[in-house]
Image (spheres, rainbow, N blue to C red):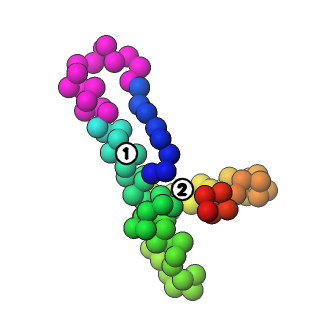
């Protein structure tokens, strides 16, 4: 992932150290899953593979990516195109 993030567990004192570690590990795993699927910096990410795929050949995407693309299309339509899901011009 190109960005930096941190996690702060807001009521950490209410949890055992083991529960805090388990929660942190779960959060890091979720971020890693998004990175594996949606990163524009990873050659093996689902999004990169989709972007490199020929437009005239079907490409099956995961339910997670399909949901995100559907929501992005909905927001783009509702904003009359003001929201642009394409990120290439920003990151390249």
Residue 59 position (above or below residue 62): below
The spot of residue 37 in percent (x, y) is 42, 59
Image-quadrant location for residue 71 = bottom right
Report the magenta stretch's main SS: helix
Q: Quadrant of residue 8?
A: top left
Q: CA distance from mark 2 to mark 1?
A: 15 Å
Residue under pointer 2: 68
Q: Which residues are magenta?
A: 9-24
Whether residue 79 is visible here, answered yes or no, is yes
- What numbered label is drawn on residue 84? none
Q: Position of residue 66 (x, y in %)?
A: 50, 62
- 1 w.r.t. 62: above or below: above
Nearest the viewer among 60 and 84 is 84
Q: Residue at x 67, y 62 (%)?
A: 89
- Name the residue furthest bottom: 56
Q: In the image, is 51 to the left or to the right of 85?
A: left
Residue 21 part of the magenta segment: yes
What's the residue at 45%, 51% (across, down)? Answer: 1
Any part of residue 73 in sight: no
Give SS at disc 2. helix
Q: Which residue is mark 1?
A: 30
Position of 51 with respect to 80 (left or right) is left
Magenta segment: does it hold 34? no
Residue extending farthest to the left is 18
Mark 2, mark 1: which one is toward the viewer?
A: 1
Residue at figure coordinates x 43%, y 62% from the top left: 42
Location of the C terminus by quadrant is: bottom right
Packing grade of label 1 (10 A; few <14, some 14-19, many >=20) is: few
The local secondary structure at tag 1 comes to helix
Mark 2 surroundings: few (<14), some (14-19) or many (≥20) residues within 10 A: few
Q: Quadrant of residue 43?
A: bottom left
- Kindly identify the residue that appears in the image at 32 percent across and 45 percent down: 29
């Amino acid at each position: 992932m190109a960005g930096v993030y941190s996690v702060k567990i807001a009521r950490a004192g209410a949890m055992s150290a083991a529960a805090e570690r388990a929660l942190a590990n779960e959060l890091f795993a979720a971020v890693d899953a998004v990175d594996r699927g949606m990163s524009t910096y990873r050659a093996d990410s689902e999004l990169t593979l989709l972007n490199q795929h020929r437009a005239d050949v079907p490409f099956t995407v995961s339910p997670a990516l399909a949901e995100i693309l559907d929501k992005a299309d909905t927001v783009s339509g509702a904003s009359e195109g003001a929201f642009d899901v394409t990120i290439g011009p920003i990151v390249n």
